[in-house]
Amino acid sequence: MIMIVDVAAYILRMCGTMTTMKLEKLVFYSQAQSLVSRSQPLFEADFEAWRSGPVSPELFALHKGQFLIYDGDLTTHGILKGEECTIMDMVCQSLSPLSGNTLSSKVCSEAPWKTTRHNLNPDATCHTIISKTLMKNYYTNHPIMVDSNS
């Protein structure tokens, strides 16, 4: 299985420089899309329900203190398979035009983040893990991307 850093590095390669907030959200949505379309995660790392939306502590540790992150900033460890790249390509094509703030607002309006935070104050710190089962169930019924062929 690939690691979260491999997914983040691929997204940066495909989309270019972005805010770390935006990267976290695109990686989250890539994980969710994999859970829906393949019934398995892209990577084992978890996301916590932080104030600004889902954040992976593992990925955060690699960009802590940065506002922008660039292609080449992350060292990859695994070899991506075609189906993994296809998922990330679809997520990037659909969501990369959105800003980090817009993605944060979007994901914070969705059940996996809201349910995990249990109606905490918006400014409250939360390190509770967003369940992969919750992600799969929600995004199966609320597609991340709209199929333009339907």
Image (cartoon, rainbow, N blue to C red):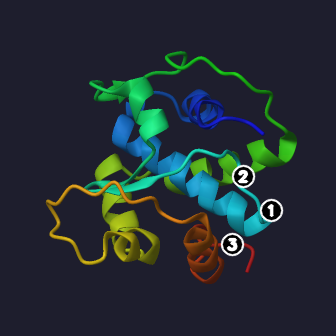
Which amino acid is tagged 3?
A: Asp
Give the label, 1 or 2, closer to the camera: 1
Q: Distance between the residues labelled 3 and 2?
A: 13 Å
Image coordinates of residue 73 in percent, x first then y, are: 49, 17
Residue holding disc 1: 38
Q: Residue furthest front?
A: 128
Which residue is located at x 29 percent, y 52 percent? Answer: 101
Which amino acid is tagged 2?
A: Ile
Pick the quarter of the image with the N terminus. top right
Which residue is located at x 80 percent, y 28 percent? Answer: 79
**Relative to residue 60, is residue 36 depicted above or below?**
below
- 63 sits left or right of 96 in the view: left
Which residue is located at x 40 percent, y 44 percent? Answer: 22
Which amino acid is tagged 1?
A: Arg
**Quadrant position of residue 57:** top left
Could you classify mark 2 by the number of other residues whose Cα lies within 10 Å: few (under 14), some (14-19), or many (20 or more)? many
Residue holding disc 2: 87
Pick the quarter of the image with the C terminus. bottom right
| Mark closer to the chain start, 3 or 1 | 1
Could you classify mark 1 by the number of other residues whose Cα lies within 10 Å: few (under 14), some (14-19), or many (20 or more)? few
Residue holding disc 3: 147
| C-beta proximity under 8 Å, tags 3 and 1 | no
| C-beta proximity under 8 Å, tags 1 and 2 | yes
